[in-house]
Amino acid sequence: MAEKELKINFEELPEFIKESIDLETGKIKDYISGQWVEATPEEVEAVQVFARRLVEDYYYSKDQIQTHPQFRVRKRPSDERREYPVDIAVFKSNKKVESELFMIVECKQPNKRQGLRQLKIYMDLSPAVIGVWFNGKEHAYIRKIQKIDGTVDYVEIPNIPQKGQGIEDIGLFKRKD
């Protein structure tokens, strides 16, 4: 069988990503679910990289992260059907239900402005309070603040909390810590 052509720069990929790709089928083994999924540039360069980072650098368990099948948020709060797929959903616990959704990671948009706009839409439609935009090279972290009058503000934050940390703990530590 001929190798499927992938539209990614294979040479620049981390070793763990290269090892997860099946060149014959053009699929990559999802780090969280173990499912084989299409090895799109977004999947290879961003989703899989950030999913692994959540586990190895931020100490979230795979049980509280959902990548494939993708978790979906509603178009409107009253909708029963969930329409919008989230690249990476992180939950407060291993219950992967909407009320436990804590963080959304958006990896689709290569442009920061467009990516943040899409991320904020998803966050508006969910209880998530932390959002991450990541395109494989650049990232942005935002916090959703619900105001007393019902409006929502978004503020950029320097990082995301590790498992067990509160949002208020972000930025208290130096890189050496």
Image (cartoon, rainbow, N blue to C red):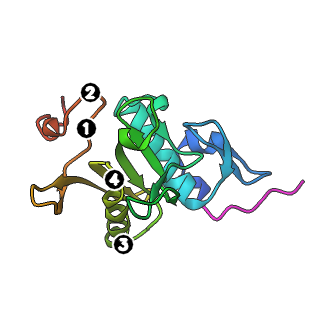
Q: Which residue is mark 2?
A: 164
Q: Which residue is mark 1?
A: 161
How far apart are the two marked residues, 4 and 3, measured between alpha carbons?
Answer: 13 Å
Given residues 96 and 116, the one toward you in this image is 96
- Name the side, left or right, on which 81 lies relative to 21: left
Sequence-wise, the earlier of marks 1 and 4 is 4
Q: Which residue is mark 4?
A: 132
Label 2 Cα neighbours within 10 Å, binned few <14 / some 14-19 / many ≥20: few
- Judge whether 1 appears above or below 171 on screen: below
Instruction: Please tell me in which quadrant of the rendered image residue 142 appears.
Output: bottom left
Instruction: Please tell me in which quadrant of the rendered image residue 30 appears.
Output: top right
Sequence-wise, the earlier of marks 2 and 4 is 4
Element at badge 4? strand
Residue located at (35% from left, 53% from top): 126
Q: Which residue is mark 3?
A: 114
The amino acid at mark 1 is Pro
